[in-house]
Amino acid sequence: MHSEPAPQDRLRFFIDQLDLDAGAMSRLEPFCPIFEKHAPAFGREFCDHFFRIERTRLLLEQGDTRARLEKIMAQWFASLFREGFGQRFLTYLWDSGIKHVQLSLDQRFVNLGYAVARGFCHQVIDQDTPLEHREEVAQVVDRMLVATDSFITMTSRCDRSMIEGIAHQVRNPITVIGGNIRRLQNQAPPNSPERRSYDMVLAENQRLERRVSDVAAYTALFQDEPRPEACRLDKALEQARAWVAAQGLWEGLAYDQQLSAKHGLVLADCQELELMLRYLLQNAVEAVDRTNPRVAVSSGPGATPGFARVIISNTGQPPREQDMEDILSPFHSSKPMGTGLGLSIAALAARRNLGSLRLGPSPQGGAACIIDLPAPASD
């Protein structure tokens, strides 16, 4: 997802409404070195808090190392007091919000993070600032954190019920348009310019239908919490393969499935697991090398103890290095007729079920999608 430049005028207007003007920042300035000094301690406390929560700990342990996370959070905390709300920091906040959209982060944990930051700042104020300045400093710091939290919310918040409603309203006209195009197409002589034009318009109409269906699937994932249970990978793959075959994509494909007897179960919401595998198989089939159309699925131990790994590979080209940052973002697609939501849906389903998903080259050549999911205790 390529973000637009940060709207500095709008952000600056918001700053003004919170009374974070030059006067407020100048009153805080003498105490900023005190907060900067505590940046490493903030990084540690922030990570301590989220590593104590099982859900976030499982997710964090699959990403960066704890030392790196502590460093990132310490840098954020120091920047907040070193740079104030200059243009560079406002751009950083805007880009952070865009990244939250790309990753579909749970806004509840974002809000919790700012609550942790506010509590830490008040500890610093109580311990290290003169009594006569504490109230004033606390007011400015609170407004700063409200501003940063609001920026993240402003750029990442998505009214999913509105999007779902729009998708529902668009579905009916798209269906009517498609039906009329087919009728006109059947009336046109074969190989005529009119027939070729109708073919092109119908293909675009079908892509819109798929996009509306994918938007509905994406927003539906936010409706309820996952219900994890021991799910059989072979059963979920069978259902996913049937769905892909119904799209007319499976014909002529060589398929190899090697599931480890020890890692044939994962702990997940079974419906979300099937949805994830459905889109990953669809992506693998659509991107396969048509001169040697092969897709393989295997399972084994995950990178983290207590996790199982599923690898879906094909004979297609691995993702380009320049696409890796955006490839899981909503509406990013390298395929001419892709909707840009399939991999985003799969990645969101993996994270909702405390797992991870990444793409890269396959050791056997081609492309691979690697999914790590919790394994049942008995697995």
Image (cartoon, rainbow, N blue to C red):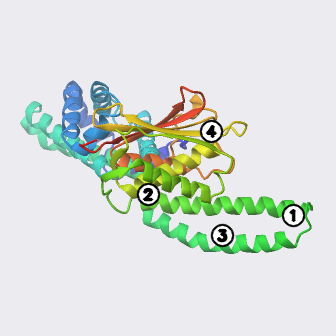
Which residue type does callout 3 highlight? Ile
Mark with earlier residue (1, 4): 1
**Residue 133 falls in which quadrant of the image?**
top left
Q: CA distance from mark 1 to mark 4?
A: 34 Å
Q: Residue at x 47, y 57 (%)?
A: 218
Query: Which residue is under mark 2?
Result: 158
Q: Nearer the viewer, residue 254 or 109?
A: 254
The residue depicted at 63 percent of the width and 33 percent of the height is: 317
Question: Amino acid type of disc 4?
Answer: Arg
In the displayed structure, 31 sits above or below 348; it is: above
* Disc 1 secondary structure class: helix
For disc 4, the marked residue is: 294
- In the shown orientation, is residue 312 left or right of residue 186? left
> Which residue sits at x=55%, y=57%?
242
Tell which circle, 3 or 2, labels the residue nearer the N-terminal end. 2
Q: Nearer the viewer, mark 3 or mark 4?
A: 4
Q: Nearer the viewer, residue 5 or 9?
A: 5
Mark 3 vs mark 2, CA separation in Å: 24 Å
Q: Element under label 3?
A: helix
Q: Secondary structure at mark 4?
A: strand
In the rendered image, which residue does mark 1 sit on?
Answer: 195
